[in-house]
Image (cartoon, grey):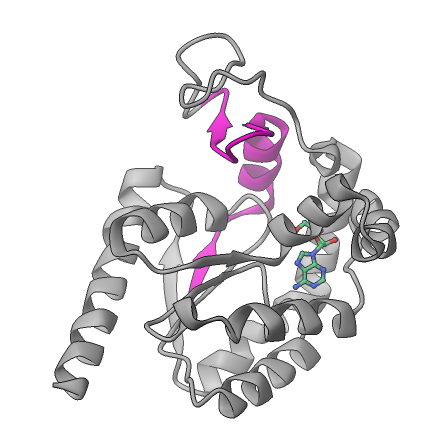
Protein backbone atom coordinates (compact mmCIF):
# COMPACT_ATOMS: atom_id res chain seq x y z
CA UNK A 1 0.00 0.00 0.00
CA UNK A 2 1.12 3.53 -0.68
CA UNK A 3 0.30 6.65 1.34
CA UNK A 4 0.25 9.61 -1.02
CA UNK A 5 -0.21 13.23 0.00
CA UNK A 6 1.54 16.56 0.51
CA UNK A 7 4.08 17.06 3.29
CA UNK A 8 2.15 17.40 6.54
CA UNK A 9 -0.87 15.40 5.35
CA UNK A 10 -0.28 12.85 8.14
CA UNK A 11 1.36 10.07 6.12
CA UNK A 12 4.05 9.41 8.73
CA UNK A 13 1.67 9.54 11.69
CA UNK A 14 -0.82 7.17 10.07
CA UNK A 15 1.88 4.82 8.74
CA UNK A 16 3.35 4.49 12.24
CA UNK A 17 -0.09 3.49 13.57
CA UNK A 18 -0.57 0.96 10.77
CA UNK A 19 2.82 -0.55 11.65
CA UNK A 20 1.92 -0.78 15.33
CA UNK A 21 -1.62 -2.11 14.93
CA UNK A 22 -1.31 -4.33 11.85
CA UNK A 23 2.41 -5.23 12.06
CA UNK A 24 3.14 -4.12 8.53
CA UNK A 25 6.53 -2.49 7.94
CA UNK A 26 6.45 1.29 7.52
CA UNK A 27 8.87 2.29 4.78
CA UNK A 28 9.59 6.01 4.74
CA UNK A 29 12.22 7.13 2.22
CA UNK A 30 12.46 10.44 4.14
CA UNK A 31 13.30 8.58 7.40
CA UNK A 32 15.88 6.38 5.62
CA UNK A 33 17.53 9.46 4.07
CA UNK A 34 17.54 11.41 7.37
CA UNK A 35 19.16 8.43 9.11
CA UNK A 36 21.83 8.32 6.36
CA UNK A 37 22.50 12.03 6.88
CA UNK A 38 22.81 11.58 10.66
CA UNK A 39 25.28 8.73 10.13
CA UNK A 40 27.25 10.69 7.52
CA UNK A 41 27.10 7.88 4.93
CA UNK A 42 27.76 8.53 1.20
CA UNK A 43 23.99 8.29 0.61
CA UNK A 44 23.40 10.92 3.30
CA UNK A 45 26.03 13.22 1.81
CA UNK A 46 24.43 12.93 -1.63
CA UNK A 47 20.90 13.61 -0.32
CA UNK A 48 21.55 16.38 2.20
CA UNK A 49 21.69 19.43 -0.09
CA UNK A 50 18.47 18.48 -1.92
CA UNK A 51 16.61 17.89 1.33
CA UNK A 52 17.76 21.15 2.93
CA UNK A 53 16.32 23.09 0.00
CA UNK A 54 13.07 21.10 -0.03
CA UNK A 55 13.91 19.57 -3.44
CA UNK A 56 13.55 15.93 -4.39
CA UNK A 57 16.52 13.59 -4.15
CA UNK A 58 17.24 12.11 -7.63
CA UNK A 59 15.01 9.20 -8.65
CA UNK A 60 17.85 6.66 -9.08
CA UNK A 61 18.91 7.21 -5.45
CA UNK A 62 15.48 6.62 -3.90
CA UNK A 63 14.63 3.80 -6.30
CA UNK A 64 17.75 1.97 -5.09
CA UNK A 65 16.76 2.44 -1.45
CA UNK A 66 13.25 1.10 -2.04
CA UNK A 67 14.44 -1.86 -4.09
CA UNK A 68 16.75 -2.95 -1.29
CA UNK A 69 14.14 -2.43 1.44
CA UNK A 70 11.28 -4.23 -0.33
CA UNK A 71 13.52 -7.25 -0.93
CA UNK A 72 13.63 -7.94 2.83
CA UNK A 73 11.48 -10.87 4.04
CA UNK A 74 9.30 -8.74 6.35
CA UNK A 75 7.67 -7.14 3.26
CA UNK A 76 6.21 -10.42 1.99
CA UNK A 77 2.98 -10.03 4.00
CA UNK A 78 2.57 -6.38 3.02
CA UNK A 79 4.17 -2.97 3.52
CA UNK A 80 3.27 0.70 3.78
CA UNK A 81 5.21 3.09 1.58
CA UNK A 82 5.28 6.64 2.96
CA UNK A 83 6.75 9.37 0.74
CA UNK A 84 7.50 7.07 -2.20
CA UNK A 85 6.84 7.20 -5.11
CA UNK A 86 6.97 10.98 -5.53
CA UNK A 87 7.37 11.19 -9.32
CA UNK A 88 5.93 9.26 -12.27
CA UNK A 89 9.36 7.71 -13.09
CA UNK A 90 9.52 6.47 -9.46
CA UNK A 91 6.06 4.90 -9.86
CA UNK A 92 7.23 3.13 -13.00
CA UNK A 93 10.36 1.91 -11.24
CA UNK A 94 8.22 0.66 -8.32
CA UNK A 95 6.11 -1.42 -10.72
CA UNK A 96 9.27 -3.07 -12.00
CA UNK A 97 10.62 -3.70 -8.48
CA UNK A 98 7.32 -5.27 -7.36
CA UNK A 99 7.05 -7.40 -10.47
CA UNK A 100 10.53 -8.82 -9.88
CA UNK A 101 9.60 -9.65 -6.29
CA UNK A 102 6.20 -11.14 -7.26
CA UNK A 103 4.44 -8.50 -5.15
CA UNK A 104 1.60 -6.19 -6.15
CA UNK A 105 -0.06 -2.98 -5.00
CA UNK A 106 -3.39 -3.22 -3.21
CA UNK A 107 -4.23 0.48 -2.88
CA UNK A 108 -2.88 4.01 -3.00
CA UNK A 109 -4.39 6.08 -0.21
CA UNK A 110 -4.44 9.75 -1.11
CA UNK A 111 -4.58 12.12 1.86
CA UNK A 112 -6.00 15.38 0.56
CA UNK A 113 -5.08 18.51 2.56
CA UNK A 114 -5.09 22.23 1.71
CA UNK A 115 -1.86 24.27 1.53
CA UNK A 116 -2.91 26.47 4.48
CA UNK A 117 -3.46 23.41 6.67
CA UNK A 118 -0.06 21.98 5.62
CA UNK A 119 1.76 25.18 6.63
CA UNK A 120 -0.18 25.36 9.93
CA UNK A 121 0.67 21.74 10.76
CA UNK A 122 4.32 21.74 9.73
CA UNK A 123 5.34 24.98 11.44
CA UNK A 124 4.00 23.40 14.65
CA UNK A 125 5.41 19.89 14.07
CA UNK A 126 8.04 18.60 16.48
CA UNK A 127 9.73 15.22 16.30
CA UNK A 128 11.68 13.09 18.71
CA UNK A 129 15.21 12.64 17.34
CA UNK A 130 15.60 9.41 19.32
CA UNK A 131 12.42 7.32 18.89
CA UNK A 132 10.80 9.13 15.93
CA UNK A 133 7.53 10.02 17.70
CA UNK A 134 5.72 12.90 15.97
CA UNK A 135 3.93 15.73 17.84
CA UNK A 136 2.09 18.89 16.92
CA UNK A 137 2.08 21.76 19.38
CA UNK A 138 -1.49 22.69 18.39
CA UNK A 139 -3.27 19.38 17.91
CA UNK A 140 -1.12 16.71 19.56
CA UNK A 141 1.18 18.42 22.09
CA UNK A 142 3.55 16.41 24.29
CA UNK A 143 2.56 16.18 27.97
CA UNK A 144 5.60 18.19 29.08
CA UNK A 145 6.89 21.20 27.21
CA UNK A 146 8.73 19.93 24.08
CA UNK A 147 9.89 16.67 25.70
CA UNK A 148 9.04 13.25 24.18
CA UNK A 149 6.28 11.39 26.11
CA UNK A 150 7.81 8.03 25.13
CA UNK A 151 11.55 8.40 25.72
CA UNK A 152 11.88 11.85 27.38
CA UNK A 153 14.28 13.22 24.71
CA UNK A 154 14.16 16.92 23.85
CA UNK A 155 11.93 17.38 20.79
CA UNK A 156 13.31 19.07 17.70
CA UNK A 157 11.97 20.80 14.63
CA UNK A 158 12.91 19.23 11.28
CA UNK A 159 15.28 21.49 9.33
CA UNK A 160 12.93 21.45 6.34
CA UNK A 161 9.95 22.56 8.46
CA UNK A 162 10.92 26.26 8.16
CA UNK A 163 8.16 28.19 6.35
CA UNK A 164 10.14 29.02 3.16
CA UNK A 165 11.25 25.38 2.78
CA UNK A 166 7.68 24.17 3.43
CA UNK A 167 6.44 26.41 0.59
CA UNK A 168 9.12 24.98 -1.69
CA UNK A 169 8.20 21.39 -0.76
CA UNK A 170 4.55 22.14 -1.51
CA UNK A 171 5.45 23.60 -4.89
CA UNK A 172 7.51 20.48 -5.70
CA UNK A 173 4.62 18.28 -4.51
CA UNK A 174 2.05 19.98 -6.73
CA UNK A 175 4.35 19.80 -9.76
CA UNK A 176 6.09 16.41 -9.43
CA UNK A 177 3.92 14.26 -7.18
CA UNK A 178 0.33 15.32 -7.81
CA UNK A 179 0.32 13.73 -11.32
CA UNK A 180 0.48 10.39 -9.47
CA UNK A 181 -3.13 10.89 -8.35
CA UNK A 182 -4.33 10.56 -11.95
CA UNK A 183 -1.75 7.83 -12.63
CA UNK A 184 -3.12 5.58 -9.88
CA UNK A 185 -6.73 6.58 -10.51
CA UNK A 186 -6.37 5.26 -14.04
CA UNK A 187 -5.08 1.99 -12.63
CA UNK A 188 -8.10 1.66 -10.31
CA UNK A 189 -5.93 1.81 -7.17
CA UNK A 190 -6.72 5.25 -5.74
CA UNK A 191 -8.64 5.76 -2.50
CA UNK A 192 -9.26 9.38 -1.56
CA UNK A 193 -9.45 10.55 2.04
CA UNK A 194 -10.21 14.15 3.04
CA UNK A 195 -7.41 14.64 5.54
CA UNK A 196 -8.03 18.11 7.02
CA UNK A 197 -9.58 16.34 10.04
CA UNK A 198 -8.09 14.91 13.21
CA UNK A 199 -5.62 12.00 13.42
CA UNK A 200 -8.40 9.74 14.81
CA UNK A 201 -10.90 10.66 12.10
CA UNK A 202 -8.38 9.86 9.36
CA UNK A 203 -7.33 6.69 11.18
CA UNK A 204 -10.91 5.34 11.13
CA UNK A 205 -10.94 5.46 7.33
CA UNK A 206 -7.40 4.18 6.85
CA UNK A 207 -7.70 1.29 9.28
CA UNK A 208 -10.87 0.12 7.50
CA UNK A 209 -8.97 0.01 4.19
CA UNK A 210 -6.01 -1.87 5.71
CA UNK A 211 -8.28 -4.38 7.50
CA UNK A 212 -10.08 -5.10 4.26
CA UNK A 213 -6.77 -5.59 2.42
CA UNK A 214 -5.49 -8.07 5.00
CA UNK A 215 -8.79 -9.95 5.05
CA UNK A 216 -8.83 -10.22 1.28
CA UNK A 217 -5.23 -11.42 1.30
CA UNK A 218 -6.03 -13.98 4.01
CA UNK A 219 -9.10 -15.27 2.11
CA UNK A 220 -7.24 -15.55 -1.18
CA UNK A 221 -4.39 -17.53 0.38
CA UNK A 222 -6.61 -19.91 2.40
P1 LIG B 1 9.54 13.29 3.91
O1 LIG B 1 10.08 12.85 5.22
O2 LIG B 1 8.77 12.21 3.21
O3 LIG B 1 8.75 14.58 4.00
O4 LIG B 1 10.81 13.58 2.96
C1 LIG B 1 11.73 14.60 3.31
C2 LIG B 1 12.61 14.91 2.11
O5 LIG B 1 13.32 13.74 1.71
C3 LIG B 1 11.87 15.35 0.85
O6 LIG B 1 11.58 16.74 0.86
C4 LIG B 1 12.91 14.99 -0.22
O7 LIG B 1 13.97 15.92 -0.26
C5 LIG B 1 13.48 13.67 0.31
N1 LIG B 1 12.69 12.53 -0.19
C6 LIG B 1 11.97 11.63 0.55
N2 LIG B 1 11.38 10.72 -0.22
C7 LIG B 1 11.72 11.02 -1.50
C8 LIG B 1 11.39 10.46 -2.76
N3 LIG B 1 10.57 9.41 -2.89
N4 LIG B 1 11.93 11.06 -3.86
C9 LIG B 1 12.76 12.10 -3.77
N5 LIG B 1 13.08 12.70 -2.62
C10 LIG B 1 12.57 12.17 -1.47
Position of residue 67 in the picture relative to residue 195 (left or right)? right
Viewer-closest of 61 and 120? 61
Q: Is residue 124 above or below residue 198?
A: above
Q: Is residue 100 above or below residue 44?
A: below
x 25%, y 72%: residue? 213
Viewer-closest of 50 and 66? 66
Magenta-drawn stretch contains 133? yes
Magenta-drawn stretch contains 27? no
Q: Which residues are magenta?
A: 109-138
Q: How many marks?
A: 0
Whether residue 1 is visible here, answered yes or no, is no
x 76%, y 68%: residue? 61
Question: Horizontal and vertical percent for residue 108?
Answer: 43, 71
Q: Is residue 58 above or below residue 45?
A: below
Question: Horizontal and vertical percent for residue 15?
Answer: 41, 52
Residue at the outermost top position: 145
Q: Quadrant of residue 164?
A: top right
Question: Horizontal and vertical percent for residue 125?
Answer: 56, 29
Q: Is residue 168 above or below residue 101?
A: above
Quadrant of ligand 1 in image: bottom right
x 64%, y 67%: residue? 86
Question: Horizontal and vertical percent for residue 210?
Answer: 27, 64
Locate the N terminus and report the quarter of the image it occupies.
bottom left
Amino acid sequence: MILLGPPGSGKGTQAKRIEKVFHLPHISTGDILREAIDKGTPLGKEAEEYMKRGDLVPDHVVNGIVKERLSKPDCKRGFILDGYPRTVPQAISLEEILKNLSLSLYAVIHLNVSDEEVVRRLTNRRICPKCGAIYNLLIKPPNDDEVCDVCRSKLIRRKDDEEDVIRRRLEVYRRETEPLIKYYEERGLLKNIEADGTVDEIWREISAIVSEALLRDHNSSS
